[in-house]
Structures are given as structure tokens and as C-alpha cells.
Image (spheres, rainbow, N blue to C red):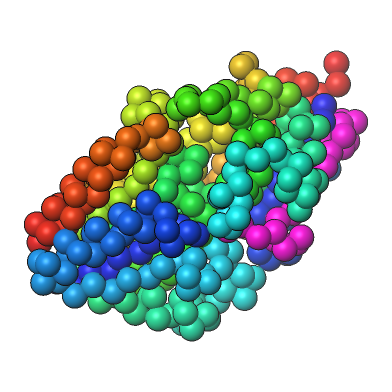
Amino acid sequence: MRALVVHSHPVATSYSAALRDRVVATLERHGHDVRVTDLYAEGFRPELSDWERQHHLDPPDAKPDLARHVDDLRWCDTVVLVYPTWLSAQPAMLKGWIDRVWISGVAYELPEGGNRIRPLLTNVRRLVVVTTHGSSKFVNSLQGEPGKRIVTRSIRLMCHRWARTHWIALYRMDRCDDRRRKDFLDQVERRLERIRGVRAR
Amino acid sequence: MRVLLVVAHPDAASYAHASAEAALRGLRAAGHHVDVIDLYAAGVSAAMSAEEHAAYEGPQPILDPVIAEHADLLRQAEALVVVYPTWWSALPAILKGWLDRVMVPGVAFVFDDRRLVRPGLKHIRQIVGITTYGSPRAYVRLVNDHGRRILARTVRLNTGWKARVTWLALHSIDTATAAQRDAHLARIERTMRSLS
């Protein structure tokens, strides 16, 4: 398995960083190749620029600052997103990574004169999310879970036809004690190991 | 009525800015006081910083003076009008980031003594979304409209579920004719003139 782990949290000692470390350790322990992108640590710029918008149909080679991100996406067969859910969706930093890296020529192509895009990331067979929510599952379902659907629908459609999505989430973190948080770290490990292809057979 | 109009597009010559101007014309014609925030022009950073994250639950969660100014405008607003292009069926990162940084405790909501969220934007009576989609309507329906859900549900929850939501959308913009684009701008201006 070739896993790209993308992490988005501003604080290096955060619970989210602990989740990232547990994900990486679990995958490596089972002998998988792991690449980590830590968006805050590398100072990724999340705002799509005017130049990028005007050149959004240019081949990705014309955007050398994104070359490594593009290469990682084309290399992996598994994408793992680790982030805290803010306002029912991904932090802007991670949304910006999607806006800027999942571009024409990388994630999809738009046939001349059409509205329907064609997926290009057919190498991606698994999309895994590890996230925390301050609010309850109930409040999240009222809100319509936009963050979850951005992954399981919008970007999922750019991946392999039979790509599986896995949602590993801690709800009501605002009211969790330390023990519940520790349990969730272990739970993340077990849930990852249940994903097909993670445990060596 | 005091209206806060937020526009999120990097190009001042874009259709999003034309939409914002049409909305502004309609709102001003109806005699409303409109404050305009152009996120790209204001140089707003989308990423909540480590310092802001640390201050989030403290007495002073906003550290950036520009965001503090925006929070004051949001506190006074009776209507929130948001203009943006839909990317990945969702909000552009700069708009999501602005919400991440401005919708903080003490502005958008407060934690009560049981650490439950209580709405802080009860003064907002109207939420208006003005957006464009590259995709046709059926595709947006299939994948769901995440941007609309964030504004019409998540942000609306912070108004105590009281605000009325008005949605003005143009689908399949890449193949829309000039006449369709103009008709949509006229519709925006007309709808904003009757906003109350």
C-alpha cells in the first residue's frame, strides 16, 4: 500500500497531531510506504491565487510550486486525511489544498465545451478520514455533514471507480475526557487495521 | 437594515464581483446600509494560526485587527450576503477560513456552563448565498451542495435557526450564454431590492 497522509492542524502538539502519528505508525508497522504532508508545518498557502484561477486549465507542469503535491497524489493508492472538523467541514487550510492541488490535469479533465468532468486519480482506491468534531453526531447530521460529503462524494468521484471511503470520527470532543481521547487513538489503530489491504495476509 | 456583504474571488473583474455589485445596487436602492468585505482585496489569510487556536476559548479569541474589524461588522449585521464561486461543491478556502476565524466564541456563539453551544448571531434575520457552479444542477444535487449547507445550516444554527435563507445560483457557468449571465445578475439585483 502507498499511503499519502495529509494533516492539517496549526498546533504541533495537538490531539490531531497525535492522531496523525498513530496513523503513520500503524501503517508503517504493517510495512506500507507512507508519505506525510503536514500543511501547516510546511507553510502551505491555502488561498487559490488569481494567476492559478486564470491558468486553471493549463497543464500542472506549469505550476512547479505544486509539483511535489501532484506527484504525491499520483503516487499513492490511499489518501488519509487527518484534521479537526471546524464549522462542520475541513479547516480552510485543507480545503485550500484541495482547491489548489486537485486541479485540472491532476484530479480531472474537462473535455472541450463540456460541463461534465472526467476523473484522473484512478490510482486512488481508498479515501480514509480521521477527524474530530466538537459537536455531537446529531448536530452534525442537522448540518448535513458537508465535510464528510466533500470527501465521500465530491473528491471521491475523481478517484478509482470502486474506491472505498472510510470515516473514522470522534464526536462531541468538546465534552470528552482524557480517557475517551486515549480510547479513540486506539480505536483509530483498530479501525485502520480492519481496512482491506492494511493488515498483511 | 444593516447588511454585511462578503465576496470571495481573487479577480476584481470576475462574475462573482459583478454579482456582488448587482447585489449592492439592489440593496442600496432599497435604502439599506451595506458594509462590503472583499476577502482577497483585504488580504485575509485563510489559515487559523497556532496563536489564534490557542486563544480560541480565551477571553480574546481574535488577534488579527482586520478580523476583529470584520467581527464587529458581523455583530452589527441584520443580513449576511455571501458571494462566491462554488469550488468542489463547497466554499473557496479563503471564505471557509474567514468563517473559521471570525465565527469564534463571543461572536458567533457562546459556550454555556455545560459546554453546549448557544447561538450568538440572533440579530441576523437574513442569510443570502449568491454563487455559481461549474457543474449542472443535477450533479450538484448528486454530490450535495456543501457550501450551501455550511451557510444555510451551520451558520444558520448560530442565528438560532431564525434567519431566512435566500439562495441565488447560476449552474453550468462554463456553458452559460451572455444572456443567461445577464439575466442572473438582473435577478440578483431584483431580489436584493426586495430583501427586508
Q: Position of residue A150 (x, y in %)?
A: 50, 38
The picture quadrant where one finds residue A189 is: top right
Image quadrant where one finds the N terminus of chain A:
top right
Q: Residue at x 64, y 70 (%)?
A: B50
Q: Position of residue A75 (x, y in %)?
A: 81, 32
The quadrant in which the C terminus of chain A is found is top right
Q: Is A36 located above or below residue B136 in the figure?
A: below
| Residue B139 locus on image (x, y percent) | 40, 26
Report whether A61 appears left or right of B167.
right
The answer to which image quadrant residue A76 occupies is: top right
Q: What residue is rendered at 78% in x and 21% in y? A: A197
For image coordinates 24% across by 49% down, the residue present is B185
Give yes or no for residue A168 being in the magenta stretch. no
Residue located at (73% from left, 24% from top): A123
Residue B65's place in the image compared with B99, above or below, is below
Q: How many marks?
A: 0
Q: Residue furthest front?
A: B178
Q: Is residue B93 found left or right of A2 in the rendered image?
A: left
- The location of residue B121, given as percent across then percent down, is 27, 67
Q: Is residue B89 left or right of residue B82?
A: right
Any magenta on residue A28? yes
Whether residue A90 is visible, yes or no, is yes
Between residues A118 and A183, which one lies in front from this camera angle? A118
Find residue A23 and report its image quarter: top right
Range covered by the magenta-colored residues = A26-47
- Residue A22 appears in the rendering: no
Viewer-side residue, A182 vs B181: B181
Nearer to me, B125 or B166:
B166
